[in-house]
Amino acid sequence: MIKKNGVVSVMGLLLFTKILGFIKLRMIAQLFGASHELDIFWAAFTIPDMVFLVIVAGSVNAAIIPILTDVLYDKGKKSLNLLFNKLLLIFTGIILILITLLFIFTPQIAQWLISFKEVGLIFDLSNTLQTSDVSIFIRVMRIGLVSPFFLGLSSFITAYLHVKKQFFVTSLAPVFYNLAMILCPILFVKYGGMGVEGLALSSIIGTVFHLGIQIPLFRKYYKEEKIDIKGSFRKMFKDSAVIKAFKLATPRILSILGEQLNVIVNTVISFTLTAGTLSAYKFAFSLHMFPINIIGSAVAQVTLPDLAKLSRKKDRGDFKLVLNKAIQFAMYLVLPIVSVLIILRLPIVRLTYGAGAFDWEDTLLTSWCLVLLGLSILGQTLMQIVMRAFYALKDTWKALIITVIGIAMNLFCVYFLTNFFSHYYDWRIILEQIIYQISTANGAGLGVVIKSFFTDLWGWMTVRGDSSLAVGGLAIGVSMTYFIETIIGFWYLNRITEIKLITWKGTFKPLFLKILNATIMGIGMYFVFKLFDLQLDTSRTVWVLLLTVSTCMYGGISYLLGSYLFKIEEFGYIKEYIINLLGNFRKRFFKKNA
């Protein structure tokens, strides 16, 4: 059974982290604007970030936590600490070797970016690197190469603490990182006049804070087991647990490389669209990731150690129970947010980005992307939990297969759908004719219209038009990719265990009730939104805010009432949590005033 209070605490910290993240980006924008110098900073940090993502982040969830959990419950704390030392030493050594090589060859990397201008697009450089930029690129990248080292150490400590079921302090780490990234640039850039080098240095200080906040708790749980490095280093790679960790990590590393390929493909295709569409897509993408990073990450993070522990048992009943509880709890929290984003997409985008040069056309385009990306929130949240189930079952190769299929699906969808939506104002006319003739029961000419539609369909999907709504192809491609990945993930989970983990009674029936409840909530919100929209002057921000808050309040009441009527189990958890929270507040308040 997943700990609901633990999930809520982690969600709260992740929400605070995201808020600080927005403040951080706003502060960076104020210091540098949309400058070429800032482009160089992002490009210079791309490779250090990739080193961390591939070598460390790709290994922790897929291999380190499951292996450490096995050793803890099979052999005890002493063996856990011994294996932790070995894995930390090996992975740190690998990171140091990569960092050293990249540090030496940084000038060659800069020259490579200058020689191949297409690479600059992949690295999101609005203007490709010039010869005059080489020195600053080298300095920033070399500073940034320190980041994977400290983040790597911190991530391993996070993994160790997760095995010990300690989630609160580990969730504080990114909070302190963002705080450093907010305060230090003011000191180094605004008052120290350091430029983007000051921003890079701030990032390093942030990673030190990320590590430092976890050390006191880590020392409490960790008792160092001395290793004779000279005598054991040669044998270290022959350790069965170490070998197993590398076998589990390898598919996940390949998966992350594949995911990066997806990002590169989407970026390259986006540069073939009309001006401004990439920015609209990125703005919408950032908004739609909000619930995924908070709810999906929190539930998956808290669930993985329990799944890893239960995977050791031959009886999969408890594993199935925890997995389905995690899925249902995450979906119960995510579904109303999806309804809100779809119904209130316009006011949300206006309130979030609608200032300065962000005009009404930008609002419409970003909202268009957001509504199509909204459907992917469900798939991405589910996949965070499903992937943890594969990691706990020590079957990371199935996870790799799912990722490969997702990459192929993304390539197919992005190419054909961006083309299709670039002809939005062409195919909509024919669709409207078909719908009109069917609704009026006038069959005259219907066959000709349908034939014309399918004749033109191939051309629309293979030739690029000029509509800016083509960016919707990127968004719906993401949604379709995660939908397919979720279906395949469910299918694989039922095949690799002796009992079916994903069933109608345990998974789909309660999920269907939640979707129905969220749909009813969304329909009601739509009418409330339209009613207020007609009465209020939505050209003013204060009325847009009132419209959004009022509609959300109705939606929240509707969702809770529906949860009660449909007897949704998670409603009981929320009700119990609120009662306990109010009870604790009442006790403290009266005790304080007694």
Image (cartoon, rainbow, N blue to C red):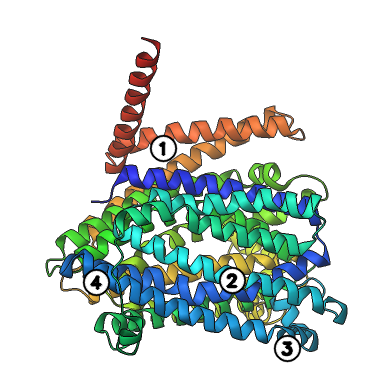
Q: Is residue 549 visible?
A: yes
Mark 1 sits on what residue?
559
Q: Marks 1/4: CA distance?
A: 31 Å
Q: Nearer the viewer, mark 2 or mark 3?
A: 3
Read off the residue under disc 2.
49
Residue 108: assigned label: 3
- Are the two marked residues, 1 and 4, in contact with CB atoms closer than 8 angstroms? no
Task: Please tell me which residue is depicted at 27% across the width and 57% down the height of the picture.
Answer: 324
Question: Quadrant location of residue 4?
Answer: top left
Amino acid type at mark 3:
Gln
CA gap between label 3 and label 1 equals 57 Å
Secondary structure state at the residue bearing disc 2: helix
Within 10 Å of disc 1 (Cα), the crowding (few <14, some 14-19, many 20+) is many
Location of residue 511 in the rendering, given as x and y in whole percent from the top left corner: 33, 53
Residue 210, horizontal then vertical, whole percent: 52, 57
In this rendering, the answer to whether 227 lies above or below 579 is below
Q: Which mark is residue 214?
A: none
Badge 4 marks a residue whose secondary structure is: helix
Type of amino acid at the residue the image marks with label 2: Asp
Q: Amino acid at mark 1?
A: Tyr
